[in-house]
Image (cartoon, helix red, strand yellow):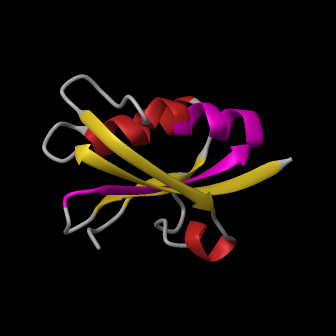
Amino acid sequence: MNVIRHVRIRGRVQGVGFRAWVQWSALDRGLEGWVRNRRDGSVEAVFCGEASVVSEMVSACRRGPSGAWVDALDEREGSQVDLDLRRPGERFSVVLAA
């Protein structure tokens, strides 16, 4: 059964390749969704896929890539509307900052 989770990651998460790492990690796990920087310095992402795989991805985001420092991760249930922000034709997108 597929689930959609919406996360917001705070800490040292911009300027360290966090978005590219999220995109690569999500695609490697077969997930759909998107990631973007936020003007407040956080990173926001939506993941859609098998519940256990999405949970694994969210856990990975609590650590991030080398060079990142995650202070907090807020997680909530996502929706199809959230998922629809990705670019048409892409499985997982890096989208414009919010």
Residue 50 image position (x, y, % from top left): 76, 41
Q: Is residue 32 in view?
A: yes
Residue 97 image position (x, y, % from top left): 26, 68
Q: Residue at x 53, y 29 (%)?
A: 28
Residue 24 lies within the magenta run: no
Residue 33 image position (x, y, % from top left): 54, 55
Q: Is residue 77 left or right of residue 63?
A: right
Q: Is residue 23 left or right of residue 58?
A: left
Q: Residue at x 54, y 54 (%)?
A: 75
Q: Which residue is outermost to the right?
A: 1
Q: Which residue is outermost to the front?
A: 71
Q: Is residue 27 in view?
A: no
Q: Quadrant of the C terminus?
A: bottom left
Residue 9 image position (x, y, % from top left): 36, 50
Q: Which residue is outermost to the left?
A: 15
Q: How many marks?
A: 0
Task: Give the magenta range.
Answer: 41-58
Q: Residue at x 43, y 36 (%)?
A: 61
Q: Quadrant of residue 53?
A: top right
Q: Which residue is outermost to the bottom?
A: 81
* Image: 83 above or below 81: above
Q: Residue at x 64, y 40 (%)?
A: 54
In-front residue for pair 83/12: 12
